[in-house]
Image: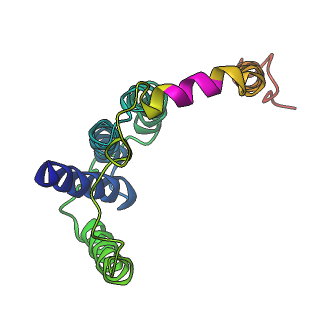
Amino acid sequence: MVYFVSMMMIGLILGLMGVASNPSPYYAALGLVTAAGVGCGLLVSYGGSFMSLILFLIYLGGMLVVFAYTAALAAEPYPEAWGDWSVLMYVGIYLTGLVIAGKYFLVGKWGDSWAGVEELSSFEVVRGDFGGVALLYSLGGWMLVLSGWVLLVTLFVVLEVTRGLSWGTLRAV
């Protein structure tokens, strides 16, 4: 299991570097899907199955739509791939920073523990992520209502801004 989690962490770092190294939006979307899938797999391996499912739906449902619109608006005849020198320079800088941060933080007790949250206590009837969902709906209900209201207002604002040149707020004066 340690090897599996280690490979997933390496995949997460590579996916995040694929997004952050400023390639064309086409390749950045592939890096985002990779990072989302591997990150949710890491959450599942540590016992957060419900949180992993919700995050995966949010990433692929929301963020990928944003990347699709970005890719459609920023279509280039010769997009920068991961093998271009400008992108490889960013990847080298990120890898150097990762090695320096790893040497700084992985000393002593920080790098020794690979145990998940569920493995640290005795037998539990309810897993940790399901208990968190129950608390979200009981004590955090007002936050869910507020979040829904904010999303509805955001939808109306975006619809008003993009309604058209003659009727919306972006009309020519």
Report x, y in % for residue 50.
41, 26
For image coordinates 34% across by 36% down, the residue present is 47
Give whichever of 119, 142 is nearer the camera.
Answer: 119
For image coordinates 39% across by 26% down, the residue present is 53
Q: Split into 4 quadrants, where in the image is the C terminus? A: top right
Q: Quadrant of residue 125?
A: top left
Give whichever of 6, 2 is nearer the camera.
Answer: 2
Give whichever of 39, 108 is nearer the camera.
Answer: 108
Q: Which residues are magenta?
A: 131-136
In the displayed structure, does residue 135 sit left or right of residue 108? right
Q: Magenta stretch: residue 155 in it?
A: no
Q: Quadrant of residue 169?
A: top right
The colour scheme applied to this rendered structure is rainbow
Report x, y in % for residue 82.
22, 58
For image coordinates 21% across by 58% down, the residue present is 10
In the displayed structure, does residue 142 sit left or right of residue 127? right
